[in-house]
Every structure is written in structure tokens, then in C-alpha cells.
């Protein structure tokens, strides 16, 4: 894996940064707007935005002069984020832990008694079925990302989406001791 890809993965492997990427999928926001939406300080939002931008996960959508300073509006170019190549084992684990922590946070905020979809499985399937399901998941992910709107837009629902699907090594049924 390239140094750039490793830096990007590590930048995303933080629950707050995952929230920021989610916010900036459907809207172009400034650091002040991100801070208000996530109830964090402006300095904290600016720091995390800088880390994500330096890792190539965000781009500046526009700049405007506000009270004698420049306010940047950021967006997450999710369409360009196709990751290629093998991710180092340690990096996968860091990202998986951040993803799991983010999922727990989202589940705590789930609407009680509303239908959702939870699945956990470790299965043996043929390669064609694996590839077909992976394509369906990619399509579902793309549809939701394209449908993303700014926070609290009229007629929208706040939803959580966490997907992890990967081929496992045969014979790795036991945790290493």
C-alpha cells in the first residue's frame, strides 16, 4: 500500500473524522458549521478537517471572506475514493476498530422500534455470489451517498450505514494466540 493510501486510511480511522466525512458527503460546510453540527470547538473541527484534507479525503469547495478572514467550505469527494491494493493488516484493524466504535455511537442514536438492517455472518460462498453481493453493496452505498443532503434538510432522515465485507483466509477460524 502506498504511503498516501496509508495516511488516508489512518486519517479516517478516527470516529470524529468518520462523522465529518459523513457530514461533508451531502453538504459543503465550513469548520464553524462542522463544529456547530458536531458540538465540538471550532479549533477541534479545524484540526480534524486539516488532517482529512492533508490525507486527500477532503477538498476545498469554495472560499469566502468573513470578518477579515478566509472561511473555507469543504466537501468529501466520495466518488473519487475507490481504494485499490492491499491494506496492511495493522491498518485494517485500526480502521475496523474506528468503524465499530462509530457504529456503536450510531446505534445508541437509533430511533427505537424503527426497522433497520443488521447482519453479522462468517460464511463460505462461491466466488460468483461473493462478487454479485459485493456489487449490490457498492450500488447501495453509491445510491445513499448520491442521495445525501445537508444536515437537517426538509424531508430527510438521518441514517447510519456501516458495511464491511471481505474475503477471509481459509483456516483462519481461530484467533491467533
Image (cartoon, rainbow, N blue to C red):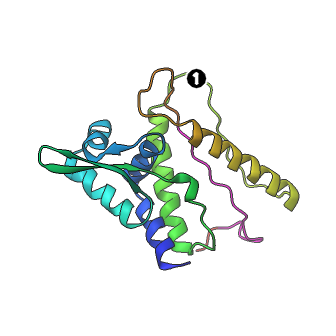
* Residue positioned most to the left: 68
Q: Position of residue 14 (x, y in %)?
A: 40, 57
Where the C terminus falls, by quadrant?
Answer: bottom right
Residue sticking out furthest to the bottom: 2
Residue at position x 48%, y 66% in the image: 9
**Going by the image, does 168 lie left or right of 13?**
right
Residue designated by label 1 = 114
**Quarter occupied by the N terminus:** bottom right
Give percent across and percent down for residue 71: 24, 48
Magenta span: chief secondary structure:
loop
Specify start and end residues of the magenta stretch as a single range: 160-174
Task: Specify whether residue 173 is in view.
Answer: yes
Taking depth in this image into account, of 73 and 114 the one nearest to the observer is 73
- Are there few (<14), some (14-19), or many (20+) residues within 10 Å of tag 1? few
Q: Nearer the viewer, residue 105 or 47?
A: 47
Residue 67: percent from the left, percent from the top?
A: 12, 43
Q: Nearer the viewer, residue 73 or 44?
A: 73
Q: Is residue 162 magenta?
A: yes
Q: Residue at x 48, y 58 (%)?
A: 97
Position in image of residue 102 (x %, y %): 46, 47
Helix, strand or loop under label 1: loop
Q: Is residue 126 left or right of residue 143?
A: right
Q: As displayed, is residue 28 above or below residue 116?
A: below
Magenta stretch: includes residue 61? no
Residue 126 visible at all? no
The count of marks equals: 1
Against 27, residue 92 (above or below) is below
Rendered position, 11 above or below 155:
below
What residue is drawn where x is 48% and y is 45%?
Answer: 25
Amino acid at each position: 500500500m502506498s504511503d498516501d493510501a496509508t495516511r488516508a486510511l489512518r486519517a479516517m480511522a478516527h470516529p470524529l473524522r468518520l462523522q465529518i466525512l459523513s457530514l461533508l458527503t451531502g453538504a459543503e460546510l465550513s469548520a464553524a458549521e462542522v463544529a456547530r453540527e458536531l458540538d465540538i470547538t471550532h479549533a477541534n473541527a479545524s484540526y480534524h478537517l486539516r488532517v482529512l484534507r492533508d490525507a486527500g479525503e477532503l477538498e476545498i469547495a469554495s472560499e469566502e471572506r468573513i470578518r477579515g478572514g478566509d472561511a473555507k467550505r469543504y466537501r468529501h469527494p466520495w466518488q473519487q475514493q475507490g481504494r485499490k491494493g492491499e491494506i496492511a493488516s495493522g491498518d485494517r484493524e485500526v480502521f475496523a476498530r474506528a468503524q465499530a466504535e462509530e457504529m456503536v455511537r450510531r446505534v445508541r442514536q437509533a430511533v427505537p422500534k424503527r426497522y433497520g438492517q443488521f447482519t453479522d455472518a462468517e460464511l463460505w460462498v462461491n466466488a460468483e455470489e461473493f462478487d454479485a453481493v459485493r456489487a449490490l453493496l457498492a450500488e447501495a452505498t453509491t445510491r445513499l451517498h448520491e442521495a445525501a443532503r445537508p444536515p437537517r434538510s426538509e424531508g430527510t432522515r438521518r441514517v447510519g450505514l456501516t458495511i464491511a465485507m471481505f474475503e477471509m483466509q481459509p483456516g483462519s477460524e481461530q484467533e491467533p494466540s
